[in-house]
Image (cartoon, grey):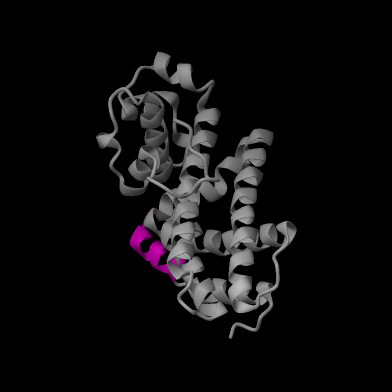
Amino acid sequence: MTVSAHTPGGEEPPVVAAIRTGAGAALAPADHRQRLLVAMAELLAEQGYASVTVTDVVARARVSKRTFYQHFSDREECLLATYRVVAEGPLRMIAQAAAAGAGQGMSLREEVAGLTGAYLTAMAEHPLLTRAMLTEPGSTGPAGRQVRREVLRRFADQLVALAAGVGGRSGARPLSPALAEALVGGINELVLAAVESADREEVDPARIAEDILGLRETVTDLAVAVLGAGGS
Protein backbone atom coordinates (compact mmCIF):
# COMPACT_ATOMS: atom_id res chain seq x y z
CA MET A 1 0.00 0.00 0.00
CA THR A 2 1.10 3.59 -0.52
CA VAL A 3 1.70 5.66 2.60
CA SER A 4 1.12 9.36 2.11
CA ALA A 5 1.84 11.95 4.76
CA HIS A 6 -0.37 14.35 2.81
CA THR A 7 -3.47 12.47 3.99
CA PRO A 8 -3.00 12.14 7.76
CA GLY A 9 -6.66 11.53 8.53
CA GLY A 10 -8.51 8.25 8.58
CA GLU A 11 -7.27 4.88 9.73
CA GLU A 12 -3.61 4.59 10.61
CA PRO A 13 -1.69 2.58 7.98
CA PRO A 14 -0.61 -0.80 9.41
CA VAL A 15 3.08 -0.23 8.77
CA VAL A 16 2.98 3.12 10.62
CA ALA A 17 1.16 1.53 13.54
CA ALA A 18 3.63 -1.37 13.63
CA ILE A 19 6.63 0.95 13.86
CA ARG A 20 4.96 3.23 16.38
CA THR A 21 3.77 0.45 18.69
CA GLY A 22 6.50 -2.13 18.09
CA ALA A 23 3.92 -4.61 16.83
CA GLY A 24 5.67 -5.68 13.65
CA ALA A 25 4.81 -9.33 14.33
CA ALA A 26 1.15 -8.46 13.82
CA LEU A 27 1.68 -7.63 10.15
CA ALA A 28 0.41 -10.23 7.73
CA PRO A 29 3.17 -12.61 6.52
CA ALA A 30 2.40 -11.60 2.93
CA ASP A 31 3.09 -7.91 3.63
CA HIS A 32 6.73 -8.30 2.74
CA ARG A 33 7.49 -4.66 2.03
CA GLN A 34 5.91 -3.50 5.25
CA ARG A 35 7.75 -6.16 7.25
CA LEU A 36 11.03 -5.02 5.72
CA LEU A 37 10.31 -1.39 6.63
CA VAL A 38 9.52 -2.31 10.21
CA ALA A 39 12.65 -4.46 10.40
CA MET A 40 14.81 -1.60 9.12
CA ALA A 41 13.25 0.80 11.65
CA GLU A 42 13.93 -1.58 14.52
CA LEU A 43 17.52 -2.18 13.48
CA LEU A 44 18.21 1.52 12.99
CA ALA A 45 17.09 2.16 16.55
CA GLU A 46 19.12 -0.72 17.93
CA GLN A 47 22.43 -0.36 16.14
CA GLY A 48 22.50 2.51 13.64
CA TYR A 49 22.59 2.42 9.86
CA ALA A 50 26.32 1.79 9.49
CA SER A 51 25.98 -1.58 11.19
CA VAL A 52 22.78 -2.72 9.46
CA THR A 53 23.15 -5.17 6.58
CA VAL A 54 20.63 -6.55 4.13
CA THR A 55 21.15 -9.90 5.82
CA ASP A 56 20.14 -8.34 9.13
CA VAL A 57 17.01 -6.81 7.64
CA VAL A 58 15.75 -9.95 5.93
CA ALA A 59 16.45 -12.03 9.02
CA ARG A 60 14.44 -9.65 11.19
CA ALA A 61 11.63 -9.45 8.63
CA ARG A 62 11.70 -13.22 8.05
CA VAL A 63 11.84 -12.92 4.29
CA SER A 64 14.44 -13.93 1.72
CA LYS A 65 17.06 -11.69 0.12
CA ARG A 66 15.30 -12.28 -3.17
CA THR A 67 12.16 -10.77 -1.66
CA PHE A 68 14.15 -7.81 -0.36
CA TYR A 69 15.48 -7.02 -3.83
CA GLN A 70 12.00 -7.27 -5.30
CA HIS A 71 11.09 -4.22 -3.22
CA PHE A 72 14.36 -2.28 -2.84
CA SER A 73 17.39 -1.92 -5.03
CA ASP A 74 19.72 -1.73 -2.04
CA ARG A 75 20.03 -1.00 1.68
CA GLU A 76 19.94 2.77 1.14
CA GLU A 77 16.63 2.67 -0.69
CA CYS A 78 15.14 0.67 2.17
CA LEU A 79 16.45 3.22 4.68
CA LEU A 80 14.94 6.15 2.80
CA ALA A 81 11.59 4.41 2.38
CA THR A 82 11.61 3.75 6.11
CA TYR A 83 12.37 7.41 6.78
CA ARG A 84 9.32 8.47 4.79
CA VAL A 85 7.08 6.06 6.69
CA VAL A 86 8.45 6.98 10.13
CA ALA A 87 7.62 10.64 9.38
CA GLU A 88 3.99 9.66 9.06
CA GLY A 89 3.57 9.14 12.80
CA PRO A 90 4.36 12.71 13.91
CA LEU A 91 2.43 14.19 10.99
CA ARG A 92 -0.68 12.25 12.01
CA MET A 93 -0.33 13.14 15.70
CA ILE A 94 0.00 16.85 14.87
CA ALA A 95 -3.09 16.69 12.65
CA GLN A 96 -5.06 14.93 15.36
CA ALA A 97 -4.03 17.52 17.95
CA ALA A 98 -5.11 20.32 15.61
CA ALA A 99 -8.49 18.70 15.07
CA ALA A 100 -8.97 18.23 18.81
CA GLY A 101 -8.10 21.86 19.55
CA ALA A 102 -10.30 23.43 16.87
CA GLY A 103 -13.32 25.26 18.22
CA GLN A 104 -12.18 25.07 21.85
CA GLY A 105 -11.65 28.79 22.27
CA MET A 106 -7.99 28.43 23.17
CA SER A 107 -5.41 31.18 22.99
CA LEU A 108 -2.69 31.11 20.37
CA ARG A 109 -0.18 29.80 22.90
CA GLU A 110 -2.53 27.06 24.06
CA GLU A 111 -3.15 25.91 20.50
CA VAL A 112 0.54 25.99 19.61
CA ALA A 113 1.42 24.13 22.82
CA GLY A 114 -1.00 21.39 21.83
CA LEU A 115 0.62 21.01 18.42
CA THR A 116 4.20 21.11 19.68
CA GLY A 117 3.30 18.71 22.46
CA ALA A 118 1.92 16.25 19.91
CA TYR A 119 5.07 16.49 17.79
CA LEU A 120 7.44 16.02 20.72
CA THR A 121 5.38 13.15 22.08
CA ALA A 122 5.72 11.39 18.74
CA MET A 123 9.47 12.01 18.74
CA ALA A 124 9.78 10.72 22.30
CA GLU A 125 7.95 7.45 21.64
CA HIS A 126 11.09 5.91 20.15
CA PRO A 127 14.01 8.22 20.97
CA LEU A 128 16.73 6.04 19.43
CA LEU A 129 14.77 5.74 16.19
CA THR A 130 14.21 9.50 16.27
CA ARG A 131 17.96 10.00 16.50
CA ALA A 132 18.53 7.69 13.54
CA MET A 133 15.90 9.45 11.46
CA LEU A 134 17.41 12.86 12.19
CA THR A 135 20.97 11.83 11.35
CA GLU A 136 21.15 8.83 9.02
CA PRO A 137 19.31 9.84 5.80
CA GLY A 138 21.46 12.92 5.22
CA SER A 139 24.63 10.85 5.48
CA THR A 140 23.74 8.64 2.51
CA GLY A 141 24.55 11.19 -0.20
CA PRO A 142 22.37 13.17 -2.64
CA ALA A 143 19.41 10.78 -2.53
CA GLY A 144 19.31 10.93 1.25
CA ARG A 145 19.55 14.70 1.32
CA GLN A 146 16.76 14.94 -1.24
CA VAL A 147 14.45 12.72 0.80
CA ARG A 148 15.32 14.64 3.95
CA ARG A 149 14.32 17.89 2.22
CA GLU A 150 11.15 16.21 0.97
CA VAL A 151 10.13 15.20 4.48
CA LEU A 152 11.06 18.62 5.84
CA ARG A 153 8.77 20.22 3.24
CA ARG A 154 5.95 17.88 4.21
CA PHE A 155 6.16 19.09 7.81
CA ALA A 156 6.49 22.69 6.61
CA ASP A 157 3.43 22.37 4.37
CA GLN A 158 1.47 21.02 7.30
CA LEU A 159 2.58 23.96 9.46
CA VAL A 160 1.55 26.46 6.78
CA ALA A 161 -1.93 24.96 6.67
CA LEU A 162 -2.23 24.74 10.44
CA ALA A 163 -0.99 28.30 10.92
CA ALA A 164 -3.71 29.54 8.56
CA GLY A 165 -6.33 27.88 10.74
CA VAL A 166 -4.79 28.99 14.02
CA GLY A 167 -4.30 32.51 12.73
CA GLY A 168 -7.94 32.76 11.74
CA ARG A 169 -8.89 32.00 15.34
CA SER A 170 -6.09 33.68 17.28
CA GLY A 171 -4.83 36.54 15.13
CA ALA A 172 -1.49 35.00 14.18
CA ARG A 173 0.15 36.11 10.97
CA PRO A 174 0.30 33.74 7.97
CA LEU A 175 3.33 31.48 7.79
CA SER A 176 5.29 31.43 4.54
CA PRO A 177 6.66 28.09 3.25
CA ALA A 178 10.24 29.31 3.71
CA LEU A 179 9.62 30.43 7.28
CA ALA A 180 7.81 27.16 8.01
CA GLU A 181 10.83 25.19 6.77
CA ALA A 182 13.11 27.29 8.95
CA LEU A 183 10.88 26.65 11.96
CA VAL A 184 10.81 22.89 11.34
CA GLY A 185 14.58 22.85 10.89
CA GLY A 186 15.11 24.77 14.11
CA ILE A 187 12.85 22.45 16.07
CA ASN A 188 14.59 19.40 14.63
CA GLU A 189 17.95 20.79 15.73
CA LEU A 190 16.63 21.14 19.27
CA VAL A 191 15.37 17.57 19.23
CA LEU A 192 18.66 16.34 17.76
CA ALA A 193 20.58 18.01 20.58
CA ALA A 194 18.36 16.14 23.05
CA VAL A 195 18.88 12.74 21.42
CA GLU A 196 22.59 12.98 20.62
CA SER A 197 23.33 11.51 24.05
CA ALA A 198 21.97 8.23 22.60
CA ASP A 199 25.51 7.66 21.33
CA ARG A 200 26.48 6.86 24.91
CA GLU A 201 25.47 3.32 25.77
CA GLU A 202 24.94 4.15 29.41
CA VAL A 203 22.18 6.66 28.66
CA ASP A 204 18.67 5.30 29.25
CA PRO A 205 16.30 5.91 26.29
CA ALA A 206 13.65 6.87 28.85
CA ARG A 207 15.88 9.76 29.93
CA ILE A 208 16.31 10.84 26.33
CA ALA A 209 12.53 10.76 25.87
CA GLU A 210 12.21 12.94 28.98
CA ASP A 211 14.69 15.42 27.48
CA ILE A 212 12.68 15.57 24.26
CA LEU A 213 9.44 16.23 26.12
CA GLY A 214 11.25 18.86 28.18
CA LEU A 215 11.59 20.96 25.03
CA ARG A 216 7.89 21.76 24.92
CA GLU A 217 8.09 25.26 26.43
CA THR A 218 11.08 26.22 24.29
CA VAL A 219 9.53 24.93 21.09
CA THR A 220 6.24 26.60 21.92
CA ASP A 221 8.03 29.90 22.59
CA LEU A 222 9.80 29.62 19.25
CA ALA A 223 6.63 28.84 17.29
CA VAL A 224 4.63 31.61 18.97
CA ALA A 225 7.43 34.10 18.28
CA VAL A 226 7.46 33.11 14.60
CA LEU A 227 3.71 33.41 14.34
CA GLY A 228 4.08 36.89 15.82
CA ALA A 229 1.10 37.36 18.06
CA GLY A 230 2.81 37.78 21.37
CA GLY A 231 1.78 34.40 22.78
CA SER A 232 -1.32 35.69 24.53
Picture quadrant of residue 161: bottom right
Viewer can see residue 88: yes
- The span picked out in magenta is 201-213
Is residue 206 part of the magenta span, yes or no? yes
Looking at this rendering, what residue extends furthest in the top direction? Answer: 66
Up the image or down, 201 lies above or below 113; here it is above
Residue nearer the viewer, 19 or 91:
91
The N terminus lies in which quarter of the figure? top left
Q: Main secondary structure of the magenta part?
A: helix
Residue nearer the viewer, 166 or 84:
166
Q: Taking 220 as reference, is 20 left or right?
A: left
Residue nearer the viewer, 178 or 48:
178
Residue nearer the viewer, 122 or 172:
172
Report x, y in % for residue 220: 55, 74
Is residue 208 part of the magenta span, yes or no? yes
Viewer can see residue 223: no
Up the image or down, 30 lies above or below 154; here it is above
